[in-house]
Image (cartoon, rainbow, N blue to C red):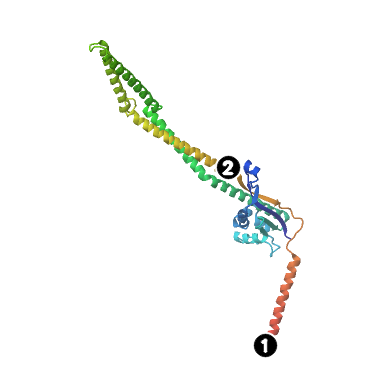
Amino acid sequence: DQYASVTAFSVRTEEISSPLELLGGLGQISGASSSDTDILYDFIQSQELVARAEQALDLRQLWNQPEEPVFGFPAGEPLEDLVEYWRDMVHLAYDPGTGIIEVEARAFEPESAQMIAALILSESSALINRISQIARDDATAFAKSELARAAEELKATRVRLTAFRNQEQLIDPTIALLERSGVLIALEQQLAETLIESDLLIGITQENDPRMDQLERRITALEERIAAEREKIGNGTNTARGGALTDVVGAYEGLLVDREFAEQSYILARSAFEQAFAEAQRQTRYLAAHIQPPLAESAEYPSRMTLSALTLLFLGLGWAMLTLLFYSARDQR
């Protein structure tokens, strides 16, 4: 007697839509995945699954029936023969239209048949979970690598900016340049006011007026101070390395541009990663089993009436052919 346990399942792809899509009726809640079902169909008949079932259930022992030389599995046969026997004892029915796979597992004990069907269901579910995880990893792998690259670039630009500040001993060279420029503008303004005052005195005073001497000394002092301030800005006396302050500001602004570009790149990479991750999470595969493996109460196989009728039919045909051959040979004599 052979007992059968039947299970049926399909692979479903569920897309979790955004609230706006759900309100607009645009979100697809669930659908069948035919390609994944095709993969399952081949997997259930594969040597890999047979090897796992042999390790978990000891199929050779379950299917070995010494008293049954016709339908039992002979002891000591290799795995390849076990795979062929598996395909005789595990029958598949696949409907491409609905994506439903029906599996019928047979064994000489009802518990054995149920265990084989349950193992097929469990291993199929594990395979779909692995496929789903691989799909999620592939969807986010590139975005993740781009995010890591952008993060490293942003870190490197910040390190270069910090090293530049430490080397020049300036937090913000532009502020130092503005301060020196402010001093220079104030001195030039004072010089202009002094020159105007000197021009006004020239028309109303004598050459030996002490006020003219004082204004001239003031003009000379202001001009010397203005020259000194311009020298400080141009020749680098205000910087730690002795470089020109304008050159330092130019290098600093270049580093600021690099940092800003790196920050924008990081923001874009972060946004792309989050979007890819969200899209990967919105689509998920799972195995939906609508028939769980039952425990058989009666033996359905082998079909003794059918086998007996076929045996008698072929025996009769064989007897008829031998009889015809016998009479044909006798007539030729």
Can residue 89 be seen in the rendering of this structure? yes
Residue 209, above or below 41: above
- From the image, tell me which residue sits under label 2: 278
> Which residue occupies 62% across, 59% down?
83
> Which residue occupies 73% across, 55% down?
110
Which one is in front in this view, the residue at disc 1 or the one at disc 2? 2
Instruction: Name the kind of residue labelled 1 in the image.
Output: Gln
The foreground one among 264 and 2 is: 264
- From the image, tell me which residue sits under label 1: 332
- Name the outermost residue toward the bottom: 333
Residue 62, above or below 265: below
* Residue 11 x, y percent position in the rendering: 64, 51
Q: Earlier in the sequence, mark 1 or mark 2?
A: 2
Is the residue marked by circle 1 packed among few (<14), some (14-19), or many (20+) residues within 10 Å? few
The foreground one among 183 and 133 is: 183
Q: Are marks 1 and 2 in contact (CB under 8 Å)?
A: no
* Residue 74 x, y percent position in the rendering: 65, 62
* Residue 118 x, y percent position in the rendering: 68, 52
The foreground one among 239 and 5 is: 239
Residue 88, above or below 157: below
